[in-house]
Amino acid sequence: MAHSEEHSGGGTKEILRVTLILTVLTIIELALGFWMMGMPLESTSRLATKITIIVLMLAKAFYIVGYFMHLKHEIRNMIMTIVVPLALFIWFITAFLYDGNSFRHLRNTYDPHFKEQATIKVEKKEGEHAAEGKEARPAEKKGAAVEQPKH
Amino acid sequence: MWGGGKSPFNVEYGKLMMWYFLMSDAFTFGAFLISYGTIRFSTNGWPDPNEVFRSYPFASEGVHAPLVFVSIMTFILIISSVTMVLAVKAGHEMDKKGVVRNLILTILGGLAFLSCQAWEWNHLFHEGAWWGRNPFINHDGTASSTNFTNFFFTITGFHGFHVFSGVIINIVMLTMTLMDKFEKRGHYLMIEKAGLYWHFVDLVWVFVFTCFYLI
């Protein structure tokens, strides 16, 4: 186990340090996930928590790639050949999520059926989960419910 | 400069090529996850992962324990990544016993993760979920679509396939180590390349777990 510090980076101490960091980051993410359960849908606090979780996730990625995969200790130009193309992801994610969001707004504006579907709540069946193998069916709209004639 | 005899970036050819393969794989997984995000963003409602993923092995029927089982899976994969780092480090020190021990631990971690994922799939299947079948409703109470289950099984399946192939690769590495192939070569560089693949698999799980279970 001796002379491990001679090798460019990657000594036992560093490995343990990074493991600890990854564990702590994961625990924080999970704690935030639990905390988020109590927040109402579409709230600012929920969005802020999600963004924090994403930032923590990126930090974990940095540690795994930099230290476990040793990229931090490689020649700088090699690091660039990996990191610079990955910058494409920034545009990839931004463009597609913006697109998806726009699609949702357009559908809500111009497709009445689509917007309506978001207001029809599913009737709760007996027991927590819907029947196995079936897709959950939307409940009848109040006005359209047909009354059964009584005998 | 063109005389040769010098490795660009001072790194072995196979290692550099493994990095570039992982880049391509990163874009594949990235495409899957971004398309998942796009579809999710384009719909008004989506199932609540804390209602869908709420069980664990040997738990009772109506248990509500979100994030518990997936946390265990995440830690298993992180620890298996640590043992892989230790295997590579042992390789640098030409410590064959250390390589063998840490490779075995990594393989066991991979198998444990696969078993957990298999249980999760089987559990969801028995609740009626599969490609083309979604028994869960949206978080806001509205009817959901099969997009949720289609994306879940496709992406976790693709990732699970990578874990499986990673385990196979590691078993091959273990066999080669035990047969003294690397001792004879004088270096354990092959273990390092397998290590890169294994860390990539762990890295992808970090993203998949966050996107499907957390946010």
Image (cartoon, coloured by chain):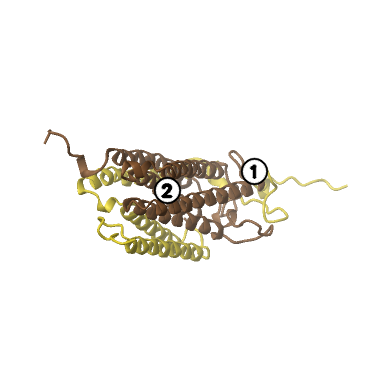
Chain colours: A yellow, B brown
Q: Quadrant of residue B57?
A: bottom right
Residue B49 location, x and y as percent?
A: 54, 54
For the N terminus of chain B, give its image quadrant.
top left
Direction from residue A83 to residue A36 in the image, left or right: right
Picture quarter containing residue B2? Answer: top left
Which of A106/A66 is in front?
Answer: A66
- What residue do we see at 32% from left, 55% from top? A67
- What is the secondary structure assignment of the residue under circle 1? loop
Residue position for label 1: A135
Mark 1 burial class by Cα count in 10 Å: few <14, some 14-19, many 20+: many
In front: label 1 or label 2: 2
Contact (CB < 8 A) between labels 1 and 2?
Answer: no
The residue wearing badge 2 is: B204
Q: Chain of mark 1?
A: A
Number of numbered callouts drawn: 2
Residue furthest to the right in view is: A151
- For the residues labelled 1 and 2, the Cα–Cα distance comes to 30 Å
Q: Chain of mark 2?
A: B
Position of residue A44 measured from the top left corner of the image (x, y, whole percent) = 43, 62
What is the quadrant of residue B4 in the picture? top left
Query: Tag 2, which secondary structure?
Result: helix
Tell me the tag on residue B113: none
Residue B118 seen from this side: yes
- Residue B35 appears in view: no
Instruction: Pinpoint residue A129: horizontal percent, then vertical percent.
Output: 67, 53
Quick check: B199 left or right of A85?
A: right
The crowding category of the residue bearing disc 2, from other C-alpha atoms within 10 Å (few below 14, some 14 to 19, many at least 20), is: some
Q: Amino acid at mark 2?
A: Val
Residue shown at 55%/60% (left/top)?
B68
